[in-house]
Image: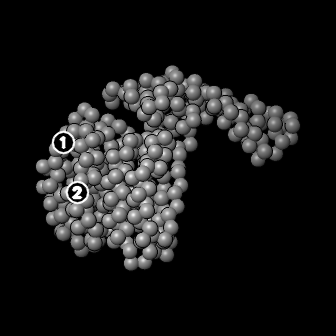
Amino acid sequence: MTTEGGATIVTQTRPLAGHEEAFKRWQDAMGAVIATWEGFIEQEVILPRPPAQIDWVILQRFVSSDAAASWLRSAQRLSLVDSIQPILAGNDDIHLVRDGASGVLPAPVSVVISTRVKPGEEIAYRRWEQRIAAVQSRAAGFQGYRLEPPVPGVQDDWLAIVRFDSEANLQIWLNSPERLELLSDSDCFTEHLDTRIVRSGFDQWFSVGKRDAAPVPVWKQNMIVLSLLYPVVFLFGLLVQTPLLIKRIGMPFWLALFVGNVVSVVLLNWLVPWACKRLSWWLQPAVQKSMGNHVLGAGIVVGIYAVSLLVCSWL
């Protein structure tokens, strides 16, 4: 069951071995509380199915993103989450997904925050992390976060991965007074904190023309780039790289390949924006009205793949 304009909170979590029944009872208690929340529609709990799926997956559907964000930052939820921390293992993985959006696929921009926690202060850090997660969930452009605990002998730091729909909204959150105040509260139980911004690689080619427009989903960016990159690389290799650079000029393969890559990137700077204008009805989330648009656009790009392969096989 979904509602137009609705949103779903997707949570992946896992209890320690032997605590499954306690976790199930806690999940029932969570369901009883959320059932009374304004804007809540339904909750679905997907049980683990090892080895393919070892986490519990909880889907909580709401009539709007605002209602979902309100639940995420509520005192009732934070109290319940705090009570279950001692028996949890693995990752806290939470996503706020607009119904009809691209789910939990990679966001256009993310920030990876590495935090070294002082020995014995792990519980204090987890409680603080719940506080900052609640605040950031209502930040403009927030799309989800993931908390990775340390891996003994491999990784000593906690990793928080926070996803946003644009770098502008991410920077607003990173520099916000609320976040800076919360960071100052963590000084007493953390040793150091490093922040690194991660961007999807093709954003500069996929401007949708409006400052406040939603970003092009990454999977569509990848499909467009591949549809243009393959014929460019093939034709350059067939017509220029092999006959001219390698055979006539005597350029070594490794250098000729580098030149080909440079030419391909330069050409894509023009070709990708050109293609985007003609597929804007498919690429721009703001104008996607139905699943039919998703399927039709993807089908056209797959058709381009097929034509490219067929033509290149004849050459």
Instruction: Please state, as top left, top right, bottom left or bottom right, where the C terminus lies in the image.
Output: top right
How far across and down, in percent of the image, does residue 109 sit?
49, 45
**Mark 1 lies on residue:** 39
* Contact (Cβ within 8 Å) of mark 2 with mark 1: no
Image mark for residue 180:
none
**Residue at position x 27%, y 41% in the image:** 66
Foreground: 112 or 308? 112
Bin the neighbour count of mark 1 within 10 Å (Cα to Cα): few under 14, some 14-19, many 20 and up: some
Residue type at tag 1:
Gly
Q: Along the horizontal axis of the image, is 143 left or right of 209?
A: left
Question: What is the quadrant of residue 234 in the picture?
Answer: top right
**Residue at position x 56%, y 38% in the image:** 202
Helix, strand or loop at disc 2?
Answer: helix
How far across and down, in percent of the image, does residue 68 sit?
26, 45
Foreground: 206 or 249? 206
Name the residue furthest bottom.
Answer: 120
Residue type at tag 2:
Ala
Foreground: 164 or 193? 193
Image mark for residue 75:
2
How far across and down, in percent of the image, does residue 88 sit?
29, 68
